Image: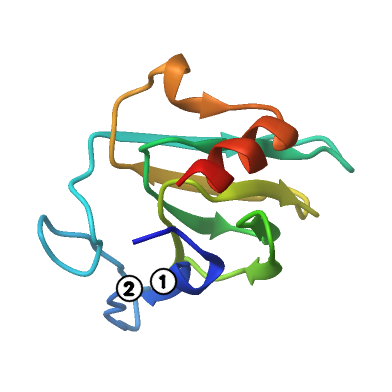
Amino acid sequence: MKSSIENCKIIKLPKVKDKRGNITFLEKNTLIPFSIKRIYYLYNIPSGAKRGSHGHKKLQQLIIAISGSFDVLIKDGKKTKKFHLNSPNFGLYIPKMIWREIINFSTRSVCLVLASKKYNKEDYIKSFKKFKALKNKL
């Protein structure tokens, strides 16, 4: 199956409300369509900065706005779609072979990323032209 924008989706994460504050949790083999091998987060993003701007050959991700907000622009080589993330109990699932750009970071925003693989520079596709060429071969 080819990865397309239609495979990208918002996943609602559990939210337990309490008068002392809310809690959201993630557990193995629930909600997320992959095993988590790596977790990282982006923060102190300067105004107007863009992150991402690449695709992955095999890696899948779940992107969550832990604090603040930002937009995730995704492309599958034919279509483009923008998601606005602004709640810590919703995450954007991005399968392999989808181009992503994270933009419009609000002040003090924190972007949490759950990844299906450990870091491997060979998995990154940093040129959109190369991304489209690889996508057309699939």
**Up-down relation of residue 12 to residue 31 (above or below):** below
Q: x%, y% of residue 117? A: 29, 32
Residue corresponding to mark 1: 89
**Which residue appears farthest toward the left when viewing the image?**
29
Name the one closer to the observer, 40 or 128: 128
In the image, taking residue 28 as reference, residue 61 lies left or right, namely right
Note whether 22 is above or below 117 in the view shown.
below
User: Could you say whether the residue bearing mark 1 is in a helix, strand or loop?
Assistant: loop
* Residue 120, picture quadrant: top left
Provide residue 42's location: percent of width, then percent of height: 58, 36
* Mark 2 vs 1: CB contact within 8 A: yes
Residue at which label 2 appears: 13
Q: Residue furthest right?
A: 48
Q: Residues within 10 Å of mark 2 (few under 14, many from 20)?
A: some
Is 14 situated left or right of 12 in this image?
left
Residue sitting nearer the eye, 31 or 137: 137
Type of amino acid at the residue the image marks with label 2: Leu
Mark 2 → mark 1, Cα distance in angstroms: 5 Å
Residue appearing at x 66%, y 54% in the figure: 77
Check disc 1 and give the amino acid type: Asn
- For the residue pair 72 and 6, the one nearer the viewer reads as 6
Residue at the extreme top = 121
9 sits left or right of 42 in the view: left
Question: So how many labels did they put on this image?
Answer: 2
Can I make out residue 54 in this image? no
Q: For the point 66% across and 30% down, which residue is it?
A: 130
Earlier-in-chain disc, 2 versus 1: 2
Dot 2 falls on a residue whose secondary structure is: loop
At horizontal 69% and vertical 69% (from top left) the residue drawn is 81
Residue 55 seen in the current view:
yes
